[in-house]
Amino acid sequence: MTTLALSIGSNIDAESNIRAALGALSLEFDNIRNSTTYESQAVGFVGDNFLNLVVLADTDKKLDEVASILKRLEDQLGRDRQQVRFSGRTMDIDILLYGNESGMYCGIELPRPEVTENAFVLQPLSELLPDAVHPATGLSYLKLWQDYDKSKQRLWPVDTDWPAK
């Protein structure tokens, strides 16, 4: 089994869409566990705040199959792929980590660059995998979060009743 780390975000009917995504993911993958959910302002555009979290799961599926499943799920939850890149979303699911893979696979850069760039990815990932080491930096995700310039992005935890924890 391979450990998969996913970033999940939404700013359109976010609670309902995240709940639906977590339910669907639990049907596709094993041992689902999620971080705290964080609210943050939109990054790169003016829009409603986002809810974001990171999910870990175990899978025996190949990376291209995982990517197809996630794209299909985003589409089922109303993702409009004609929108500009930085805009509101019903659902955005990104593969952050696929085991210990590092480099380009199936058109996906692993670990995903957003891991070290965005607080709404790094903080929840550091909760779930504090001692895991980012291959490019050689630093743990917890150390990366401790060193992150928190003035760049403000985020705050929100109470949720998601099924996995």
Image (spheres, rainbow, N blue to C red):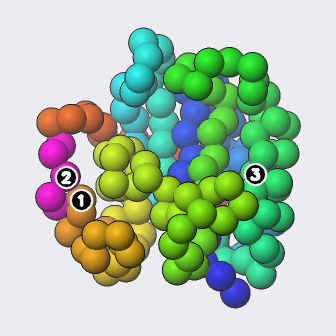
SS for tag 3? helix
Residue 145, label in figure: 1
Give the mark nearest the N terminus, 3 or 2: 3
Q: Residue at x 58, y 33 (%)?
A: 10
Q: Say which of 161 and 41 sits in front.
A: 41
Q: Say which of 85 and 125 sits in front.
A: 85
Give the mark nearest the N terminus, 1 or 3: 3
Q: Quadrant of the N terminus?
A: bottom right
Q: Amino acid at mark 1?
A: Trp
Q: Is residue 96 visible?
A: no
SS for tag 2? loop
Distance between mark 2 and mark 1 Cα atoms:
5 Å
Q: Is residue 128 left or right of residue 69?
A: left
Distance between mark 1 and mark 3 Cα atoms:
26 Å
Residue that mark 3 sits on: 70
Up-down: is 145 above or below 128? above
Distance between mark 3 and mark 2 Cα atoms:
28 Å
Q: Amino acid at mark 2?
A: Tyr
Q: Which residues are magenta?
A: 146-150
Q: Residue at x 53, y 23 (%)?
A: 86
Q: Amino acid at mark 3?
A: Leu
Q: Is residue 142 left or right of residue 113?
A: left
Q: Say which of 71 and 136 sits in front.
A: 136
Q: Is there a contact, CB below 8 Å, between mark 2 and mark 1?
A: yes
Q: Residue at x 56, y 58 (%)?
A: 109
Up-down: is 151 above or below 59? above
Residue that mark 2 sits on: 148
